Image (cartoon, grey):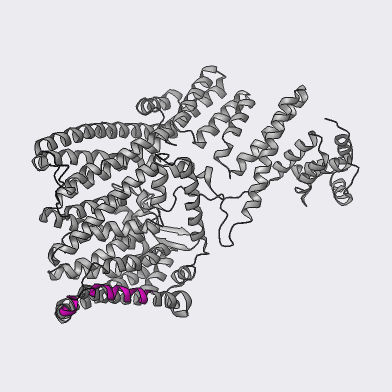
Amino acid sequence: MLQFEAPIYWAVAITTLLFIIWVAIYFKQIKLETQQDWLKVAVLLIPLTYVLSLISAASEYLAINMILIQCIYAIIFVMTMYLLQNNKINHIIQSSLIGIAYVIVGFGLLNWLGAFSFAGKLVGWFSAGVINGVYNQAIWNDSNGPRLASVFQYPNTYAAFLMAFLFITIFSMIRSKKVYTQFLHSFMLVPIILSLLLTLSRTGLVMLPIVFVILLLLLKPAKQILWFIYSGVAAIGTLVVLNPINTAGLELQLQFSGSLAAKGWIYLLAASIIVAIVSWVIQRWIAPQLEHGIQSWSARKGSSLWIPLGSVILTVVVSVLLLGTSVRNILPDSISTRLENINFQQHSVLERITFYKDSTKLFADYPIIGAGGGAWTTLYEKYQNNPYVSAQAHNFFMQYLVEVGIIGFVIFMAFILFVFYQYVGAYLRRSEEERESHFVYFILSMSILILSILDFNMSYVFIGMLVFLGLGGMTAAMDPKPLRRSKVSKSAARGMYSVIAGITAIILLITSVRFLQANHYAYEAKKVAQTSQDFQEIKVPLDKDLSIRSTHTDSLLMLSSLYQQGFQQTQDAQFYSNSIQLLQRGLEAEPFNKNMVKQLMSLYEMKGESVQAYNLKKEYANNYIWDMDWYEQLISRSFDLGYQALGQGDAAKKESYFTSGLEAYQHVVDGVEHLQTLPEGQLQGQPFELTPTMILNAGKIKYMLNDSAGAATILKGGIAEDLTDATNREIARWYLAALTKDGQQDQAIYDKLIAVAPNEADEIKQIAELNF
């Protein structure tokens, strides 16, 4: 979308500039001798697979954007795998990441406790997300009520972020030797857990224990026990204040009250301080004795497995208590209800399963190199099982698969699995202090990737940057194992990599700057259009944008619309021709863009070229199989053109148009029947049903094909109680005429219709006497 372009292109430009600086500083250290070194080459294959997928891209616009985004990730990975080998830089980056996370948590709670305006002012000077002084959807409202989303505007992704930093916070507190940092980290435990619960994210709650157990497997028994203790202390502290803060937040969303907000903050600060003090006491006096007391047990083989296994049993017990008993009533109603609805027949689970099945259908058509970046967003309407609306597949890995196909997916999975495998191997071989230096990055990447199995967290470029930063940090901690057969001299490695880096950086820098210019012109055109009606004044920035990106969707549609208005007002054929050329050019790059197709059909209709409009409607129908309006219009146009052909005596065309209309009608009938087979808990999505207009036109078509019995069957399904409505009355008229044609009658409907409109008797008789 246009509003998200500029931040992405700025990120590309800034990342590229940092990369150029990095190459200049680290030039002499560039070599290709170890597995670690070759990963900076391997990571380049990830954006290259997106370049390859351009061949069959469903959307050139989204595919190019994804190439740029993948380049950001690759550059971040390469830079961090070098930078994070330096202890000082490693410490700065870890501290910065944690600091940013704490600020985001604070920002979210400001919004929850009613300080919308203050929070908006804090970020309004740099964020486009602030609308009318309030950060848009920091509190996300849906059928479950208000849900905390903070800067992410989506609660489930915020939950993934919070979960990663909850574990990072616990790890950092245990690892820290300084009192004030221990106190800071332990102080943030309650706000983080509280925020996690306020997201009402079932995905987060389900996946949290899984991630927790995985992390425990990499810790020594003493650390495992401490993780349990601190998690328990923070959880208890959170539960004590959860109800009043949750209630305060819900009320403050409706109406601000200074006293209520202050009460909420007092509860939060008190719980955080108490948990921080208790945690500091444990860390200061109990933790050292614990480590010393179980030292001999820790040395035993397999000792690290017992507590994770016990935690699995504990998780099962807690889950049974919370999901199957009244214990969950200690939680606020909103959270309790969400827990109660965790089951495999719940609509969000069933919908995700549907998304994944539909992804496999999409993948089957683009198996080798995929359908390019943004493939799911562009194509899902063609493959969907029912008329849901979801521009994301809610599974990062399935979405990745349909974008780059099996080649890109295998490369990506091989890359990340190799990094994780090598990191864990190096981690297990090292001393405690060496292990801890980069463990934050493992927590970060692993947590987000695991939660991305059930959601689209990686569709956020910021989250993707965090994951690749984490992968870079893990690579920095790998053992530098030499590659015997692939050793390249240092001078050759520097030369090769510098050339590749230089060419890539130049292309990315030029592209990002040019795209930023295009984005600026697109916004300028929108701004001018709000205050001016001057054709040329609006056209100038649009032409500048399209001279840079010839198929930039927003500007192309806007300029085409201008030409269309010009043609409508002046009937100048040049306006019409220019608009047609623009839209046809756009559809070559964006063949599944519904707005372009609709605008082109509208243009044809305006010129009176109804056959061309019909052909487009029919051609693109398979791309929007659950668009009820699309099929209603297709049936209507099929009838109109068939009736016109009938009047002209062209039997072949009449047959063709009428057959097309009946096929479209049958598609809707089959779709409605299919929707009846959806599992009980699954939501249908958008409306999809037989409308009176569909029934009327399909019935007329049947009648004009001399199938009066078939016409009566179709039309009977559209008989309505309200016969004062013109369409309903026409359905009844043709239904009765079809029956009369076959020597039958429906007296009840006939009497009802005549009572409303006595002249219908003659109309019915005239239709019944028609022969086609």
Residue at x 41%, y 57% (from the top left corner): 454
Q: Quarter holding the C terminus?
A: top right
Residue nearest the observer in this picture, 554 or 205:
205
Residue nearest the observer in this picture, 145 or 307:
307
Question: Can residue 115 be seen in the rendering of this structure?
Answer: no
Residue at x 21%, y 76% (from the top left corner): 277
Q: Quarter holding the N terminus?
A: top left
Question: Can residue 418 be seen in the rendering of this structure?
Answer: yes
Q: Quadrant of residue 309?
A: bottom left
Q: Would you say 573 lies left or right of 88 here?
A: right
Tell me which secondary structure the magenta stretch mostly adopts: helix
Above or below, 771 against 401 in this view is above
| Coordinates of residue 683 in the picture (x, y in percent) | 56, 57
Above or below, 173 against 632 in this view is below
> Does residue 310 belong to the magenta stretch?
yes
Q: Quadrant of residue 285?
A: bottom left
Q: Would you say 587 lies left or right of 715 here?
A: left
The part of the chain drawn in magenta is 294-315
Residue nearest the observer in this picture, 651 or 279:
651
> Does residue 458 belong to the magenta stretch?
no
Residue nearest the observer in this picture, 39 or 102:
39
| Coordinates of residue 53 in the picture (x, y in percent) | 38, 37
In this view, which residue lies farthest toward the front?
Answer: 485
Above or below, 251 against 673 in this view is below
Q: Would you say 434 lies left or right of 309 here?
A: left
| Coordinates of residue 602 in the picture (x, y in percent) | 58, 30
> How many numbered badges does the structure rendering display?
0
Above or below, 190 against 617 in this view is below
| Coordinates of residue 552 in the picture (x, y in percent) | 40, 32
